[in-house]
Image (tube, helix red, strand yellow):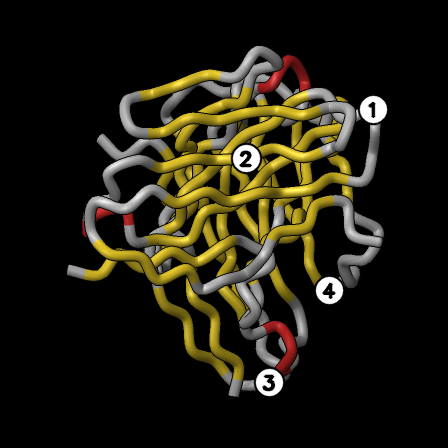
Amino acid sequence: RKEVEQDPGPFNVPEGATVAFNCTYSNSASQSFFWYRQDCRKEPKLLMSVYSSGNEDGRFTAQLNRASQYISLLIRDSKLSDSATYLCVVTTGANNLFFGTGTRLTVIP
Amino acid sequence: DTAVSQTPKYLVTQMGNDKSIKCEQNLGHDTMYWYKQDSKKFLKIMFSYNNKELIINETVPNRFSPKSPDKAHLNLHINSLELGDSAVYFCASSQELSGHRGSPLHFGNGTRLTVT
């Protein structure tokens, strides 16, 4: 079983829509959680960390559900510039960091 | 002013050759990494290097060897290149070991290696 699993998509949504991605992780001892964004042919960049109480950054909201072992990313009022692949990242301790394969989002005009 | 820079951006070479990819970070981070992203976009860690301690992913062939002349540099040398080595290789750095207190990664812009 993979450490981190994501629905690869693609998710095609119209501008202004709300879209949510989930990511499940297998290790209940996982400690830190992140969402990264990767544009086509570019490097991954940190989008936001995911805190136990949930956190928001503008149109982006991240949630953690330890009981069900998943994290989520909600994007409100989607923009064309949100089109990218969103990578879920989970750590289980020092130097044990695992990437999901990513969920591809395309926002359509 | 690029935080993590790697060269070259593109590398096309023939099977059996030896090649190197260079990486430098100016963030003052303690840890550097090499990641491989295959055609299915899966990012997999190859090496991490922290305070002269090298941690190797056991699945990485020993044809791959990281070399760190100092804390700001971690180069990747590849011997006897094979077709399956074709991928995008990302260098990254973090303040502490990734996962330790949630220290996020800063990536270089990648080296697209094509082995023919």
Cβ atoms under marks 3 and 2 closer than 8 Å: no
* Number of residues whose C-alpha sits closer than 10 Å to that of mark 1, classed few (under 14), some (14–19) or many (20 or more): few
| A65 vs A98: above or below | above
Q: Quadrant of residue A92?
A: top right
* Mark 3 or mark 2, whichever is nearer to me: 2
Pinpoint residue B102: horizontal percent, then vertical percent.
Answer: 60, 19
Query: How many angstroms separate mark 3 from mark 2 (CA)?
Result: 42 Å
**What is the secondary structure assignment of the residue under circle 3?**
loop
Image point 15% across, 60% down: which residue? A109
Name the residue type under label 3: Met
Q: Name the residue carrying label 3.
A: B15
* Mark 1 or mark 4, whichever is nearer to me: 1
Image point 78% across, 60% down: which residue? B62
Cβ atoms under marks 3 and 1 closer than 8 Å: no
| Closer to us: A68 or B47 | A68
Image point 31% across, 57% down: which residue? A13
* Number of residues whose C-alpha sits closer than 10 Å to that of mark 2, classed few (under 14), some (14–19) or many (20 or more): some
Give me the chain letter of mark 4: B
Query: How many angstroms separate mark 3 from mark 4 (CA)?
Result: 13 Å
Query: How many angstroms separate mark 3 from mark 1 (CA)?
Result: 42 Å
| B19 vs A51: above or below | below
Give me the chain letter of mark 3: B
Q: Are marks 2 and 1 on the same chain?
A: yes
Q: Are marks 3 and 2 on the same chain?
A: no
Q: Name the residue carrying label 4.
A: B63
Q: Any mark on residue A72, and which?
A: 2
Q: Name the residue carrying label 1.
A: A29
Q: Earlier in the sequence, mark 2 or mark 1?
A: 1
* Mark 2 or mark 4, whichever is nearer to me: 2
Q: Are marks 2 and 4 on the same chain?
A: no
* Mark 2 or mark 1, whichever is nearer to me: 2
Query: How many angstroms separate mark 2 from mark 4 (CA)?
Result: 38 Å
